[in-house]
Amino acid sequence: MLVSIGIKRLLFLCMGIFPLLLRAQNLVANPSFESYAKCPERLGLFDTNVASWSCPTSGTTDYFNACSSAMGTPENFKGRQPADFGDGYTGMYVFAPDDYREYIQVALTEPLQAGKKYQVSFYVSLAEKSDSAIKEFGVLFSNYELKIPTQKNLSKKKRYQLQGHQYTYLEIGYTNFFSDTKDWILVNSQFTAKGNERFMCIGNFKANARTRMFKTKKNAKQGAYYYIDMVAVSGVEKMEVAKPLVAIADGKETSNIELDRSYIFKNVLFEFDRSSLLKSAKNELEKVYTLLRSNANLKIAIDGHTDNVGSVAYNQQLSQLRAKAVANHLQELGVPKERIVWQGHGGNSPITENETEQGRQQNRRVEFTISKSVVAPD
């Protein structure tokens, strides 16, 4: 959907940014958990109440909806969080004592196509009564529905004991945003399908000892409980270069910026084996800063990429440095660090071939996604 961003007294001219990807229809049914069999009146009813969704384990994932006094929104037993995409959302433990875990699972409306690129996204907010936060979310695609009688983490060993099951596994991790207890934060990543993906499961698949986490309160004993909403899986296609972003005049909302959509910086490219910003890149980032400065309810996610020259580990580190360089410059300009997240992807997602220097330079890029920060009122 196109979202017009109303910004008074802002003239946002010729940013030199063009859309990288165009997402197709969402392949997730009931993406914001609005359809339900019965209004939830107690804990652990996600598996039986929410249409199209299920729990792949014995973990008791929760369902919240404004229709309920016991499991309602915005106030509930884990804190306060308004439902920004309707009346409902889910809540689950992704880190807890004794490796206890909860997950959500959905059948895609159609199987993914082998070799095609897709984007997966969802919104998260850490519940206020959590005392820990994780740094990565796991997304598991499978050819068959999972149903494993365990309340612990869905480890690789457990998954591969199921005969005939095939998997595509992603980890999505940014730098700082999983500890946010007020905003809905966009989590997203892109991947190339193998062609056996029919179901999707979201949660933390690692044991406590392997989970990248941190304590948000002293003497943490409860764990990390997250609200999740608006889940999407959609195909992405390359686009032609679009027109520059248009001006936004007083009282007029004419911007064709689309929130929650990936863009590529036109001038934020890098020399081979370098992560320092060029002057042209800084000029472009100043225009992005103008947008973020004038809209306190917007956040930016930054994704760094490399070409395929070098080892996988080295390119991963280099892509992180490139994303961090952009994030640092935006902070130097004045964007609060709480509104910026970044991650590196190495050379796993080229946008063109790597056989020529011109192609490799295009792949040495930084993408960004601007999303709305939904803050709970005091």
Image (cartoon, rainbow, N blue to C red):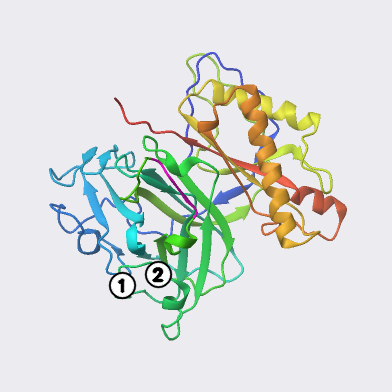
- In the rendered view, tell whether residue 136 sits above or below residue 269: below
For residue 28, above or below residue 333: below
Residue 358: x %, y % from top left = 85, 50
- Residue sitting nearer the eye, 219 or 135: 219
Q: Is residue 242 left or right of residue 211?
A: right
Residue lying at the far front of the rendered structure? 219
Q: Residue at x 50, y 38 (%)?
A: 259
Residue 351 in view of the camera: no
- Asked if residue 102 is positioned above or below residue 333 in the image, the reply reads below
Q: Residue at x 66, y 23 (%)?
A: 13
Identify which residue, 97 or 376, lies in the foreground: 97
- Name the kind of residue labelled 2 in the image: Leu
Query: Any magenta on residue 214?
Result: yes
* Residue 154, numbered label: 2
Q: Nearer the viewer, residue 158 or 220?
A: 220
Residue at the limit of the structure toward the bottom, as seen here = 163
Label 1: few (<14), some (14–19) or many (≥20) C-alpha neighbours in 10 Å: some
Query: What residue does disc 1 label?
Result: 150
Marks 2 and 1: CB-CB under 8 Å? yes
Under circle 2, the secondary element is loop
Alpha carbon separation for disc pair 2 and 1: 8 Å
What is the span of residues highlighted in magenta in the rendered image?
212-216
Kind of residue at badge 1: Thr
- Chief SS of the magenta region: strand
